[in-house]
Amino acid sequence: MFSARMLWRVALGALLALALVGVVQGADWFSLARLQSQYQDLQAWHAQAPWTVRAAFFALYVLLASAAVPGIVVLTLAGGAVLGFGWGLLLVSFASSLGATLCLLVVRHVLADSLPAYLGAGMTRRLGHMTRGLEREGVFYLLSLRLIPLVPFGAVNVLMGLTRMPAWRFYLFSQIGMLPATVIYLQAGAQLGQLQSVSDILQPQVAAGLIALALAMAGTPWLTRRILAWQRRRTVAARWKRPARFDYNLIVIGGGAGGLVSAYVAAHAQARVALVEAGEMGGDCLNRGCVPSKALIQSARIAHLARHAAGFGIHTGPVQVDFAAVMQRVRSIIAAIAPHDSPERYRAMGVDVLQAYAYLVDPWTVELRRSGQAPERISARSIILATGSQPAVPAIAGLQDSGYVTSDTLWDVLEQSATLPRRIAIVGGGPVGCELAQAFARLGAQVSLVEAAPALLSKEDADVSALVQAALSADGVRVFTGHQVLRCETLPAHAGADKLVVLRQNIIPQPGSHAAPATPAAQDDEFALPYDLLLCATGRQARLRGFGLEALGIASDTLLHTDAYLQTLIPSIYAAGDVVGPYQFTHAAAHQAWYAAVNALLEGWGALRPDYSVLPTAVYVAPEVARVGLNEQQAHTRGLAFEVTRFELAGLDRAICDAAHGAVPAGFVKVLTVPGRDTLLGVSIVGEHAAELLAPYALAMRQGLGLKAVLATIHSYPTLSESARHVAGQWQRAHLPAAAMPWLARWHRWRRG
């Protein structure tokens, strides 16, 4: 009838209530003056009934410790004064640890859903620091907190309850960590009559000793990591011979976003750097990804606006798309941005840019392989792998025979063609598939988009996916969600459709998707889509082959494994970007690359850990989709309590001004906050320029600012950025004290006379 978890919560709640009652009933006991005045009576009671006093003392200490009462120090003094050092140490050490653990369990199982809402920004930041400290240093971090007398006993218990540390581990190391301070307080209790205040207990030399011990404990993980790193280096050195001298401080393999940032950082740190790239500088983003796709999307947007110009009172003739000119513009944009990533620019910084294939001979040596030339070897203290990723091609029967393109090979095919393919099938409803499907449809192609999941952009919330799907359908894209690609077929030319992709519905699609057979070729539950160009946009996989990783023992079939500091199993080799993942974004690669470069240059002396908690993402469909932090489905998955505040862009003046005649602006701003507080957990925006509108929210989350700070900021009128003020105001109105409103109205009536 009752679950074990429910009974557990009831028991802990009862314990908390009992502890609080004890606190209220005996609050006046928890002062040094009260203890000193009752000292003789307590000693007499102890002499008459020692076991009763010991049992009562233990029970009271457990109750007060479980309630995180600040006056617990006075009770510790009483233990030393009345019970003596031996019994006092025995009872206090176990009672304090048991009470602290009960406090942790109460917070974790009873208050975990509501307590975070009442923590201020300062306590929230401390909790974040504590969580990161535990992840970095483990139980040594808890030990150091227990040893520092300035850190409140109860605060540690409460905040630890919001972490994932196992209760048994918390108890064990609390028992150890609190022992030195317990000894000092108990010894002070023996001189109770000489104490003027609790602060007299911790003389400067005593406090300094405890802090020194805490720092030693906090430094233990650092020392442990140094020892382990030294052992790893010795293991590596036993297998390979380490060069006595190095040609470079750092060798970076890969000239994409990650490699360029790593080389840039190292060069500006005055290190000698070599950047090895076999292909085009700028990597996939410049040559085959972000830049050409956004250039194409902009041309498609202009074509779309031209077709709908009448909605703005502008009448034009039929819109004609010169696809060859569109592709020429794409090439010119790549050429305009290319100097930012050029070998000349990086050589001017002092980077040796080497056009060659890189092969790792050992942990410090890279062999440069060039066609028609003898191999050349260079060495460095550290190496960064930034080899990027490549499209993942699904195993579809007949795909190789029928022909296909990926996001990498698409651009060469389009440049070779003077016209846009008439019928385009795209497999994959992620960001790349959705962006290119809409762009091709707006440029005049017949586009079919196939996604196996029940919705497009499956990582986003359902309302975001539904709006994107509706927008794509409105632009003429036939969306097949919940459909499996069975095979590709090539038919004789006289059949009229020489290439087909055969589908089968496997999940009930969302409203608006095409579930009915699209051609007369349907058979049973299968049906076929004819195409002239098939684009596979089913994700990307790390580029790991051909660099010698297998011989070094750090190869992987998926992502390259690194620790939290981007260091591989071999101490001298680091990695950044898509080869590491899990975030396949240019800005994520740049973020990792900065840390990889710093850690590689400091190898053996220190390390910095990248923080991904505020990582913005964007999908450049129309309307755009942008997000930072958590969305609803992620918060549900993590079991987090949250509030949602949503503002529709249809109510924003600037959005109305920019819309066509009679059109309702599409999109919304959705903010997730801690219940009862303005603390941001995440923001999702769907609308025009959503990626640009997201930046202030990312800044606010990074700096610990809430919606009240957003509301207090003056925004220009009329702008799309005003949506931030509106959503913050909506949150504020929802959190006005409802009970006070009638009294406020009465007060205003009284003021009117």
Image (cartoon, rainbow, N blue to C red):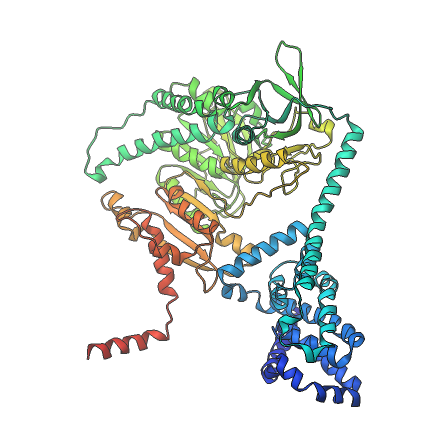
Q: Nearer the viewer, residue 390 or 342?
A: 342
Whether residue 737 is situated above or below residue 120 in the rendered picture: below
Q: Position of residue 225 (x, y in %)?
A: 71, 44
**What residue lies at 67% left-to-right and 69% top-to-bottom?**
100
Image-based side of 354 in relation to 456, left or right: right
Q: Is residue 56 visible?
A: yes
Left or right: where 159 falls relative to 732:
right
Q: Residue at x 54, y 28 (%)?
A: 267
Q: 532 or 350: which is nearer to us?
A: 350
Question: Which one is in front, 539 or 233?
Answer: 233
Check the picture and name the quadrant holding the C terminus: bottom left
Q: The N terminus lies in which quarter of the figure?
A: bottom right
Out of 12 and 607, give the one closest to the viewer. Answer: 607
**Rendered location of residue 706, percent (x, y):** 43, 56
Residue 2 appears anywhere in the view? no
Q: Is residue 740 above or below residue 388?
A: below
Point out residue 271 in the picture as x, y percentages from the top left corner: 59, 28
* Quadrant of the rendered image containing residue 273: top right
Left or right of 17 on screen, residue 531: left
Looking at the image, which residue sits at the far top? 372
Residue 752 is drawn in which quadrant? bottom left
* Relative side of 480 to 89, left or right: left
**Residue 207: image x %, image y %?**
67, 63
- Give the tally of numbered discs: 0
